[in-house]
Amino acid sequence: MSEFKVVGKAIPRHDAWAKVRGELKYADDFTLPGMLYAKVCRSKYPAAKLISVDISKAKLLKGVKAVLTARGVPRNETVTKFGQSTDVKGGFEGLYRVLAEEGKKIRFVGEPIALVAAETEEIAERACDLIEIKYELLPGVFDPEEAMKPNAYLVGEEDSNIVNEFGCFTGDIEKGFAESEVIVEDRFEIPFLDHAYLEPEAGISWLDDYGTINIRVSSQVIEHFRDVAEVLNLSHNKIRYIGTMIGGGFGGKEDITVESFIALLTLKTKRPVRLVYTREESLMAHSKKHAFIEKYKIGAKKSGKIVALEVHYIGNAGAYTYLTPWVGLYATVSAAGPYKIPNVKIKTQMVLTNNVFASAFRGFGANQANIGYESIIDELSRKLNMDPLEIRRINCMHTGDALSTTEQVIKTYVALPEAAEKAWAGVGEPTVSKDKNIKIGRGIAIGQMSYGRMTFLRDSSRCYVKLETDGSLIVRSGIPDLGGGQASLLSQIASNELGVPMEKVKVYNTDSMLTPLAGTTTATRQTYMSGNAALKAAREVRNRILNKAAEVLNVNPDKLDIVSEKVIVKYDESEYLPLTEAIQACNAAGIELYSEAQFNAPFTGIPDLTNIKGMTFPDFTFGAQAVEVAVDIETGQVKVLKIVSCYDIGKALNPACVEGQMEGGSIQGIGYALSEDYALQKGIPQTPSLAEYLIPTAVDSPEVKTIMIESGGGLGPYGAKGIGEPSFNNIVPAILNAIYDATGVRIRQLPATAEKIIRDLKKDFFKK
Amino acid sequence: MGEYKIQLTVNDKKIIATAKAEESLLKFLRRNGFTEVKCGCEKGDCGTCTVIMNGKTIKSCISLAMQANGKEILTAKGLEKIEIGRKLQKSFVQHGAVQCGFCTAGMLMVAKGYIDKNPEPDKAEIRKAISGNLCRCTGYKKIVEAIYDVAAENHRLEGDINV
């Protein structure tokens, strides 16, 4: 193995310059001659039978080139996928319905009904208004507990609103509670969240000379080319995805957004078609983070040792299944946190309602679990009069322990209680309040979050590396870059292995026809999966160079390394072969200086979903966050003063990028804890724009202190673990626990708004 | 509503073009090729469309193209011609203040506008100054540091020994 020359350094990303210069063309910045503008006509009602859609007037409007309803979609109903090349079945692949169908049910406000393509955006908009839609309004069901009742209104065509049920049992739960000396029970309610990436959904499609539909789009999943092909009833190789740099994703661009719509309209009109959502449309129409109702019961000995845990989750899936089953599975596996508990009973039910559909969101079900277990354990520590760090020390897992839910043994380093201790210490001296109405409090939370996909998805990633004759390097990968530096990381790895400076490495990414498919940028999988694929490909090329250079230099190849464009003899750097000469020698001998490598994650079978056991994820990232808050007990306002985020990231391949995730994840968590609530009243969104849906600004955000533990024990390249989603775990319950510490108010319904805190603090007043 | 011919300067380039009476400056600029001015919400909430007009930092989505008639506009693409602009760009890159980059052009403009007004800001003042510009990726820390370092370097160069 080569030494770390480039890996481990905070190198500026290759895309950063194009971004600061304003040169980078995002999905919305690209136009084509003869381009049409698309608009989507959407449902105004959350629950209705679609009686008829009359497009005759819209079609007559001058400048309108196409109006499409479900009748015009070759295959209007397929299944939702997210890049997997194998079907899991068993209810995991839900219904993907492109446009609402006459005679069937409308399920949510914003459900697409018809599409328009026109010469201008204004004409397309007017044409949408001319579409006459007849609905028969239906009562709908909006609360998941109502939706589970036997005679509940049915959201869809199935005979139950329950999408999936999952279970996990360990030990004997009855016995566990019988042995408990202290029992705490509570119920938490967690709202829908919006991803609120700054870039609304956008894409453009066109037909090329050979009849292929090209789609240039901001997507986390270029493998959706297959799903769009299914909708158009074309073979998979007739659709090409060209992914753009993404203006933020967080899971919200994991499902298909605009692509099916523009592809259909291009197929119909033979012209380029562009569709860009407005912010209001984005909020209304794309997926949300699942709202959860959580019932927790925990039993412990007076010593603080936890002996029993019972959890019941009810996940609100909204109107369509999308990735709901997977989210439910994440929550179930995560439900007991990183704690050793001998008796565990977990039950999860994911339920359809007439709200906007929920799907992927950074954390994917693990966060909702984390909020629950870290709140109940905090309550338990209070009841036991025990230090919050101490109760975690007593009960946390260590290396070689198994998760209490699935009993999957964690073979890599479990950085507990180390991360908790470091985070807690990192908060430093307590802030002293100068105002009697400002109360200071501290909170901590710990957790585990998977990196890499569920193992029964049989995940793989591919990468291509090629040394050019001039010594420059080409990396090709289907890797979508969300802004986390995913694409740049691959060049860093290739650069490190082949001794080519970063400025001479060119990454070409996200072209479903031309770049090896690398899988989705989701599930904190790219450093692990594509990082390993890049490493494998680079090492193959490296070995060929070293073998050839060894012949030339007449030394053993294992005595050689490639540093700064020279193949050097280790320990005697005066003797070397310039890299370009080694390349020449290889080319002259017909030795291939390219490699396309595939990395496979561990593969498992589909678990028994009624009692999930064994490996479900390749590995987990462990960490902790500690915070200090100030609460104004006169107004209920919370200010987060300090955040310390401590994770075992295995090896920080680019510390600036890792810090960026840890800082960004923490601040996104402030929104989740304190202000963000995608509220719906009978299915009607109450936060239609960013003026109502409040994400943290710079003044709401403290400076996050990051502590990286580099255990070297991860499954990624050079021992790295994933950090994208884990960094967003722990922060929410840490804030809620700090609010309790400051005020004695336990937040059971997120977010912790000033109003909720003040109502609790002054409950005696409100009772009168 | 009608269309009007307007004349303005964008990054030292003279533009003569027609604008609809109700057209936002954001739409006008993007339609004329200045796609570095981003559209994140079109109602003044997010700040991705921030530009500088005659020295004043504005959100172009809630300004009319007509209001820019006869004015000078600076966008992120014009920063390279200005020393402080180049420094800010470099500082953002080096600090890792750029992730998805969709807020970056607007952030740079608000930073440039603010440093012009207050050359010696502390970090709290910078946070306040950029609070009308949202970023969902970075958590703001590296953006604040990137701006602070440029400002700090500036007064060092001016001989301010307190920095």
Image: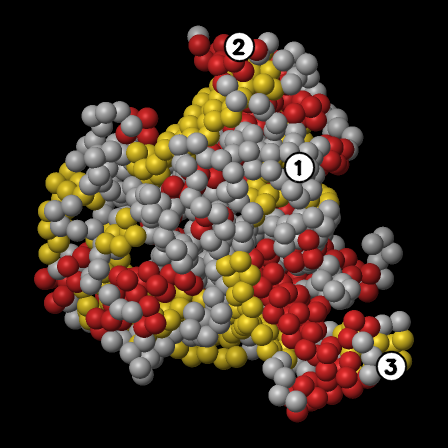
Which quarter of the image is occupied by the C terminus of chain A? top left
The percent position of residue B89, horizontal first and vertical second, equals 65, 66
| Horizontal side, residue A190 vs residue B77: left or right | left
Secondary structure beneath disc 3? strand
> Is B142 placed left or right of A519 in the picture?
right
- Residue annotated with mark 2: A178
Say whether mark 1 and mark 2 are on the same chain: yes
The chain containing the residue under callout 2 comes to: A
**Percent position of residue A522, x then y:** 49, 53
Q: Find disc 3 in the rendering and name its residue.
A: A575
Between the residue at mark 2 and the residue at mark 1, the CA separation in whole angstroms equals 28 Å
Q: Reading the chain from its start, which is encountered first: label 2 or label 1?
A: 2
Circle 1 is placed at which residue position?
A400
User: Which badge, 2 or 3, comes first in the chain's sequence?
Assistant: 2
Q: Residue at x 63, y 55 (%)?
A: A716
Q: In the image, A341: left or right of A694?
A: right
Disc on the earlier residue, 1 or 3? 1
Few, some or many residues within 10 Å of mark 1 (<14, 14–19, 20+): few
